[in-house]
Amino acid sequence: NHSTLTAPIRKLLTSNSKFFWSTECEAAFIRLKNIIASEQTLVPFDPDLPVTVACDASPVGISAVLSHIVNNEEKPVCFVSRSLTQAEKNYSQLDREALAIVFALDRLYTYLYGRKFFLITDNRPLSRIFHHHANLPAMTAARLMRYAAYLSNFNYEISHRSGEENANADYFSRNPVNSGGQLGNQNILDEEVFQIQEETLSFISTAQVTSDMIADQTSQDPELSKIIENINSGTSQLEEFTLQGNILFKDTRVCIPRTLQENILKELHLTHPGIVKMKQLARRFCYWSNIDKDIERLVRSCESCVLNQKSPAKVPPHHWEKPKENFSRVHMDYAGPKDGYYYLILVDAKSKWPEIKVLKKAPDTGVTMILLEEIFSMHGYPDFLVSDNASIFKNEVFYMYTKERGITQIFSAPNHPATNGLAERYVQILKSKIDKMSADTAPVSEKVQTILQHFRATPLACGMSPSELYLNRQIRIRLDAIKPAKKLPSNVCHQGNVRTLQVGDRVTARVYRNNKLTWELGFVQKKWGALHYEIELDNGHVFKRHINQLRKADIPALPPAPPISTPKKRVVFAPTPPINNSYDLQISIAPPNYSQSLRSDANQSPPSGPLVRQSARERRPPQWLSDFVSH
């Protein structure tokens, strides 16, 4: 009635009237100002102002209100609404509210696309489903999935508003504009939904269950009949249910009457899937109350599934308690045959100290007890002996062997080697190292000893080696040879004063010859350490003596013999007999017999050639001849 309100003022604008501001003009002007300033007046769209879109749906129509926020108040820009089709009236309330949002964004596309706006709905579940950061589960209804994909094109923030505060949109949803059947895109969506529902019905239809049977039994089911009655009357509070013909759907799943549920369960369990897979399959096609519990009951009571199911999930490993003493608990196992050999492996649980025995033949109980006795003779008997259930370890003879020695046997569960995991791990280590040392031509026993020596000297995860944990010291291996040798302090052997000799001192030395002990004169030639000396006797013999086998002497040395030709010495191996568990290895250089030489020379004819002059220098044999007797 804009023309009626403005008529007194418009008369002033005619060419034949005199301008006179009457009381009617004043009243019309004041009324126009009040109407323009009221909330019922639409405001022009301003791209610089915040925009809100409030949506609502009723059993007969859907609507939306586009508004600006001015001075913290919503000013409407435009209203849109339309009535629902017959198919849409069968939607659940959740689907109708979602349809109202899609309808609003489609009709107001020009205002909303490419800018941020605030989307308002009075349906709280939709405020979570259509949230930008929501992760929709796989079983979400197909219609809602399509709506969410469409809304992803817009930049919005969705929020919930109670129905009482959303009255403007609620009014237009209950008094919608007749759509006149112009719903092209929405009809296509409806056809897609119907197609999905038809495919669902086709899937669950079998020789025992058909869509006609479902429709017939649905009308006779008290629970489903009540839901259908509420949907038809528009009083249903179950927003996720829809009706197609006489068949009830929850989202895209068929609601199965109670009389047909067992048949559907058998069809779902046709290939004997597990509980999880069967639930996933059921959530695609069918629904009834407590369907998950019925599926669990069926699978657990299926004899074929129970007898052929996989092993249960493994529990977290339980670690053995750490023994308080070394060699209190040991783990034992056999490895092999490996390259024709068997290996008895025994490991201390605390220090991880390994012992390995090599066998050329398959072991038995008797051999095992002998090998264990060799190990126990060095380390003592353990309190506990852990092994698998091999017949070698689990028999009466071995039981008596352990019982007599106070050893408690602990057996792992059959076919569960993880219980004896320490020994099993060392079996793997041994096999791996033997394979890696295959290029080494050393005997297997020598390889095993090398492996043991290096493993005992190698630090474990705790930073200490098995030898440090077991022996409280680090054992020496060949690599220790690269370190400089440690020199013992001079007072390491004796306390107090120690006699010392100097090179060139005149001494008497103890000589062991022909099982007799004698003292002979000589000189100190070289000093070996603090207590050992190299002595040269007057007769030319050179040997090594301890300070306890030497005495200082003041007897002068004999004058040197005149130079004379001496026959060649012939080296003969002649070990000296032992005395007091020691050996005296020395060099005997026989002195020349001058008288005999002169007589032999007199009897011989003079040489036919010229005489060869012999050197007059003093002859000393090389050091390496100290291990032989020369003649």
Image (tube, rainbow, N blue to C red):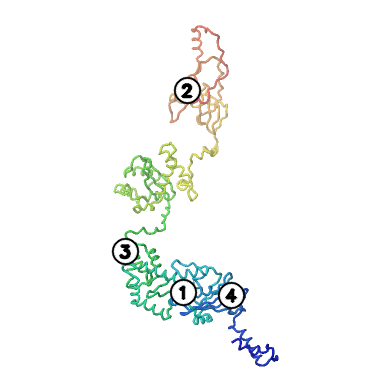
Whole-number angstrom distance, CA of label 1 to CA of label 4: 24 Å
Proximity of marks 2 and 3: CB atoms separated by less than 8 Å? no
| Mark 1, other Cα within 10 Å: few <14 / some 14–19 / many ≥20 | many
**SS category of the residue bearing label 2:** strand
Report the residue marked by disc 4: 51
Label number found at residue 302 = 3
Amino acid residing under circle 2: Val
Whole-number angstrom distance, CA of label 2 to CA of label 3: 97 Å
Amino acid residing under circle 3: Cys
Report the residue marked by disc 1: 95
Whole-number angstrom distance, CA of label 4 to CA of label 2: 120 Å
Frontmost of labels 3 and 1 is: 1
Amino acid residing under circle 4: Val
Q: What x and y, as percent, mark residue 157?
A: 55, 72
Residue with the most extreme front position:
16
Q: What x and y, as percent, mark residue 269?
A: 34, 64
Whole-number angstrom distance, CA of label 4 to CA of label 3: 59 Å
Frontmost of labels 4 and 2 is: 4
Proximity of marks 1 and 4: CB atoms separated by less than 8 Å? no
